[in-house]
Amino acid sequence: MTDRSADVLPVNQSLGGVTEQLAGIPLHFPARRRWLATMVFACALLLLLMVSIAALFTRGVGIWGINIPVNWAFAIHNYVWWLGIGHAGTLISAFLLLTGSEWRNSLNRFAETMTLFAVICAGIYPVLHLGRPWYLYWMFPYPATMGVWPQFRSPLEWDIWAVLTYLTVSLAFWYTGLIPDLAAARDRARSRGWQIFFGITALGWRGSAAHWSRWSQAYRLTAGLAVPLVVSVHSEVSLLFAAGQIPGWHSTIFPPYFVLGAAFSGFAVVSIIAIALRFWFGLENLVTDEHLDLLGKVLLATGLMTAYGYVFEVFDALYSGGPHEIQTLIDRIAGAYAWTYWGALVFNFIPLQALWWRRVRRCGSALLLISASVVVGMWLERYMILVTSLYRDFLVSSWGEFTPTFWDWSTYFGTIGLFLVPFLLAIRFIPMISIFETKELLHEEQEERHGG
Amino acid sequence: MTQIFAPAADTWLRLFLAGGLALLGGGLVGVIGFAHSAYMTSTDFRPQQPVPFSHKHHAGELGIDCRYCHSGVETGPQAGLPPTTTCMTCHSQIWTNAAMLEPVRQSLTQQKPIAWTRVAKLPDYVFFRHDIHVVKGVGCETCHGRIDTMPLTYRAKAFTMEFCIDCHRDPMPNLRPEESITAMGWRTPSDTQKQREAIAAHEGIRFGELTHCYVCHR
Amino acid sequence: MTRRVPPDSNSSQGPGLRQWSGIEELSGDPAFQAWVDAEYPAAAEFTPTARREFLKLMGASFALAGLTGCEKSPFVAALPYVDQPQDVSIGVPKNYATAVVLDGYAQPVIATTYSGRPTKLEGNPDHPVTQGRSDIFMQAAVLGLYDPDRAQGPTRRGEPVSWNDVADHIGALRAEWGRTQGEGLRLLTGPVTSPTLSRQLDALLKQFPKARIHTHEPVADGGRRNLTAAAYGQPLDVDYQLESCAVVVSFDDDLLGPGPDQVRRARSWSSARRRDGNGPGLRLHMAESVPSITGAMAGDRLVTEASRMPSLAQALASKAGVTGAAMPDLTPVEREWIDRAAAACRSAQGRALIVANAFGDVATASWVARTNEALAASSLLRFTTPLQSVANAGALADLVAEVTAGQVETLVVVDTNPVYSASGSLNFREGMQKIRSSLHLGLQRDETGELCEWQLPLTHALESWGDARAIDGTATIIQPVISPFYDVRTVHQVVAMMSGQLDPAAEAIVRETWRSRLPGDFETAWRQSLRDGFVRDTAAEAVLVRPDPAEIVPPFADDGLDIVFRPDPTVWDGQFANIGWLQELPKPLTTLTWGNVIAVSPALAKRIDVANGDHVKVTIRERSTVGPAWIAPGQADNTVALYLGYGRMRAGRVGDGIGYDAYAIRPVDQPWLTKGTLHKVGTAEVLAVTQLHHRMDGFDFVREVSVEHPALQPPPAQPSLYPARASSKNAWGMVIDLDSCIGCNACVVACTAENNVPVVGKDQVKIGREMHWLRIARYFTGEIEAPRSFFQPVPCMHCEDAPCEMGCPVDATTHSPEGVNQMVYNRCIGTRTCSSYCPYKVRRFNFYDYRNAPDSPEQAAHNPDVTLRSRGVMEKCTYCTQRIEAAHVAADKENRPLREGDVVTACQSACPTRAIVFGDINDPDSEVSRLRRDGRHYALLEEQGTRPRTTYLARWNDKRGDRQG
């Protein structure tokens, strides 16, 4: 482990330097103009979301393109997509923390931040897609005057819990990891305001040995909690579909298929952000080509596993011999929405193959493009899974069509704003790379050198 | 380097957090309590009526049977409010020019209905039938309370789904013999359970079938 | 359900009492209308949808029913009667026997009313001809009553006037007629069977001998009377004795199709079809040019041009040995079909009936008449003298001639709409200018009413005292089930005014007619007739006729396409254009809603390269119209079908400006079949169809059995991990006989009426959001030129293991101990999971708020026992649970178990062929249990393990049809 991590960070840099560099980003922010421009764009999107939601709540879900039979489309589809993206963060931090792969240390912070906001974006969809959102609270078990409870057999009921738990734990995990750095930032803060802000958020951290030991216990404990959640959440989401009898949904491959797909898209987004950040803030010394290389490998691996899911779906349909399953398969490959199927295949897996070459993996721009294509590909995959299964299910007489309306799109792009705005704020106000963990890693490496 | 915070800051922070959590929990309990409150279930208030009609006087003191005015109660879904003419059967003889009965007389002369304010009203997605309840041995009192003690009528029981479903789950405690349907303050005799079972058997109550949704919602 | 009311409650005052027992009473009240208009003057101008939206935004919170979210104060006003009438018990429905009218014929109904508000019409089970069955027009009539666009008071040139002004004007006219003996007075009526109206008109003519009456029947019986006149030497009505038939050969005759005679024929057809359990009791051979529901049911269907019918009829005639019938030259396919048909007729030995199209030509009719005689089938035909006969009435064309000659001073149009439905070539609109004084009597201020000087609004049948004859001549005395809520009069009152009575009482006129005709004590007989809903022994006498041996001249042969005119299956001749239920009703073979099409054959479509929805131009003798094309599988290559009833301009907010007007190019001399040309225009539109895909694609949704293999494979027993659900005493189930279902849609409209199913409008239907709880799936198999067609009604299956139930997070859809899959609107939060999981996609969702505007009169048509669904909730077939619960209450009050027939669903009671059977499957003797044991019984998608309670009986495949399929 260590011998691999030995060359993750360039050793020829001082520990203090690292702290200055990272804590400095929020304190005296570089690249203000670029940040502002992005922020304006993000806010515009957020505004779009607000308008869409207003329209939705005043007029009803009818403003979307949904109908019978396709009565689930963009809302659920983007919900799954966002939640998928929200996976990598916890996976990277928690899972790799427990396996002790220190190279994660430069990535976990913003990966976790990304997770947090992606899950929030996902979280609003189950509310929006309700016909009568104002009765959302009926989904929670509470002693109602009606004397009735939610139905615990329903995948949607599990879903609420799965997502909320995941959100809470990710939040806890993210914040726990943040505390020591907030303290560091506090100590370097010049202005009173910053001192108080970081002071409170650091919860009075003084870095005593006791603090450290308790902290690391808590941190590893939450990590231990988070890892199984990563699996549970998306398995659960997949059951939204697998629990139904609709051809193309009713399959046991779904849980692993969804989890892997989620990790796949998640890592793609992590790489995008990693590359963007290191380019913005000149962090080449901390987010090194080595990191990109590793990310590329993980992306390739998860991608191939997702591909296996595709293969198995086809096999399932054929092996089942069910005329409706085969009908759906044909519709996917050659039907009105075949473009989503082929689109998903192409965007997900063709550019991905380039990652077999080390040079491509280590080249930022190349990895960025590939990741982008994966994100698009996964979006198409969710579209495919929903629409191509629903628009033609069992009875020919009930077959229909689906065309997204303006409001479908505006709501979707709006959530991108909902993601970007808080994320940009986070970049602005908190250290985007874990200072102490990086230092820890750097220190270890230097020890290695002197010792060896 | 100067300290930013006083030594007590930590304690304050902890207190703050604890307080926040307590507030959250308390609020939740509060909201649920409020939903059950007399205010929300409208059991707290006696609406103003065009004529200050007193059930206490008519049903209690004079002992007029409920069915004299609410004639639909055995035949139809709605017990029905008495037509003006019903009031006038007596009040054309007695209190013929009492001021408080002016609206009644006007209603008759102008052929305009008296605009009573409804007290016992269910949401319109609840399809309640008086007749079946009365026929099956559920007394007026069970839902409308001691109407014979109400100078101004109010809602004695909270008409929540809980209230209905409890009885639909186990009607036994609320069953009474036919002759006591309209009786107020009726006490179950000693051998309660046996008698109730007898009634239930006699009425052929379809136990277990009364709780499914379509019984009340369609 | 049909509890009769004591006769005294049908007294002259009528049951429509004006006391109000709740705000819904007000909705039809002019005062209430006035209030709304005063509150929101702007709203009056709006379309219903816009108006609804507007009122919502204005926070018009006087919603009459439905899911009102969380209302804090339940303390709303309650209005008791001032003086409660004896026979009114609030919330308890009352039933009255009366009739609604289609093309002059009575459609006997039992009207269900809630505190004086008719909400639902059922067929009258005691009526000798309909026997409780019904059709779409009968079911939808109740909405016509509450049509917000009805004329609400008399107008002169659009300005409101009083009935006194009307009386004065008529008085003035009468004075003039008195001088001229009615010279220049012309009356134009629609189809009339009413004894009272005939009596009145005769009286009028006696007063003014020089006056003339003309009739205008855009569709009515098609050309039947002319055809019989040609074939038998006198105009006749004819009744096919289908019960006694073993074989029917139809030359383009859509005998099961919509129209006044549909109920009677469908009923007798299905009973013949079911005659013996081990095979189809009646086999249908059909040659047709335009696919019809009859053709869909035919075992042996030949696709050929309408203009080929005479030759085919002649061929069959010569096969049957009719004298003078030379064998014409036929195509091989035609010859084969004729051979099969002839063989079938021979083997049927006198139980074979040949029928010709009422919209067809004289030659075919004559050949058919003779063939029937040759086949000794005369016992299968019952001829009667025409019911629709106003004494020596002239045709519309003659009237127009007189008008153009300036011989018409005064025209009185009685309940018909010639300005819209007269053939374009007559230029009736222009003619009207020449008339000095014109009066229009009608329900609406329609195209004609607008053009006439005076528009005198009439009562709807449900508000009227009147009478009419059913298709077999049995008279019904029409009694009002609600008193008119607009300032209107019955047609008899107005005609009486013209013959000199001042403000006559509606009932008196009708009594007058029957005083002399009812046997025995009049009052008794009168009440008896009102209670029964018909007058006993008034059916028309059969007359014995023989075919007229005159020379048969084949219709002129002409090149060019056959252009065939047909009444629209749902809005008929256009009179129902403003009834939303019928506009949104999918037309049987196309599933098209909200419009009409120009139907072309697949071959023709390929030739001129058009797809569904492409605009095409049809030209007939220099007149042309443009409409969307529809490729009709199984339509004859050179036949183009135009559908009447659309393109209306003054139908109302619902019916205006939809579709194209086929009357504009309809020739007077050839109203049903003519020649013309067709061109592609280049533009196109999206048609609002409810089923996008029609091929069965090799699935076995509709199964078939044959005489050789009369039973289906019983499904393998399906093991389940779950313990069987305990059932309560009753377990509801439904069996639908696909061999009897003719796809007529009566069940769909009945369901709409019974369950307050909303009308969502064209745009919503286009994007797949129609709300019908019961859809009639329509499939075809075989090649597109000559496919076999199938109908399959698909309501909720009420699965015993329902996928929808486990999906709902809030338990809004659950399973009742009686096996009904329950949908609780007020618990639904609209996750739509149930619909996603439903393998049958029978659930419907309120994507918007589809309810009527809170102030619209249609509100009064709502069934108060069914919740109005708000925006964002799922809904679906409930097996008419309100009827089940009502039956339970009734039985429980009497402390007895439910009996067979206590619960009848709306679709079941409407079905003209009794294809839908509902009942208790726990009771081994119930009809439904019996059918579930039948060899033809099967469940849809049974391999899915949902164990549906709604199941099907396979269709009989008359083998002889196979080569066609």
Image (cartoon, rainbow, N blue to C red):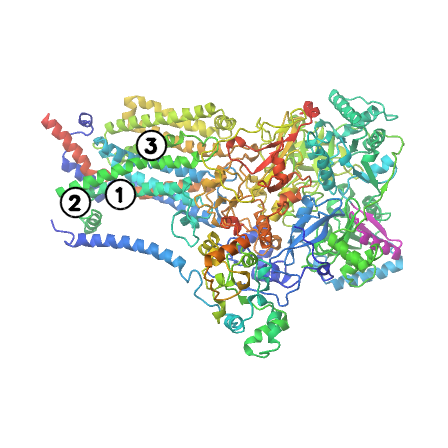
Which secondary structure lies at badge 1? helix
Separation of marks 1 and 3 at Cα, in angstroms: 20 Å
Task: Return the x and y of residue A452 as percentages of the image width and height.
Answer: 10, 25
> Image check: B204 left or right of C238?
left
Separation of marks 2 and 3 at Cα, in angstroms: 36 Å
Instruction: Please check the rendered image and state whether residue A452 is part of the magenta-colored stretch, yes or no.
Output: no
Label 2 sits on residue:
A188
Amino acid type, residue under disc 3 in the picture: Ala
Q: Identify which residue, A328 or A32, lies in the foreground.
A: A328
Label 1 sits on residue:
A172
Q: Which residues are magenta?
A: C187-216
Instruction: Please check the rendered image and state whether residue C189 is part of the magenta-colored stretch, yes or no.
Output: yes
Task: Return the x and y of residue C530 as percentages of the image width and height.
Answer: 75, 55
Which secondary structure lies at badge 2? helix
**Given this view, does label 1 or label 2 mark the residue nearer the observer?**
1
Task: Return the x and y of residue C149 as percentages of the image width and height.
Answer: 65, 53
The image's mark for residue C319 is none
Q: Earlier in the sequence, mark 2 or mark 3?
A: 2
Which secondary structure lies at badge 3? helix
Label 3 sits on residue:
A263
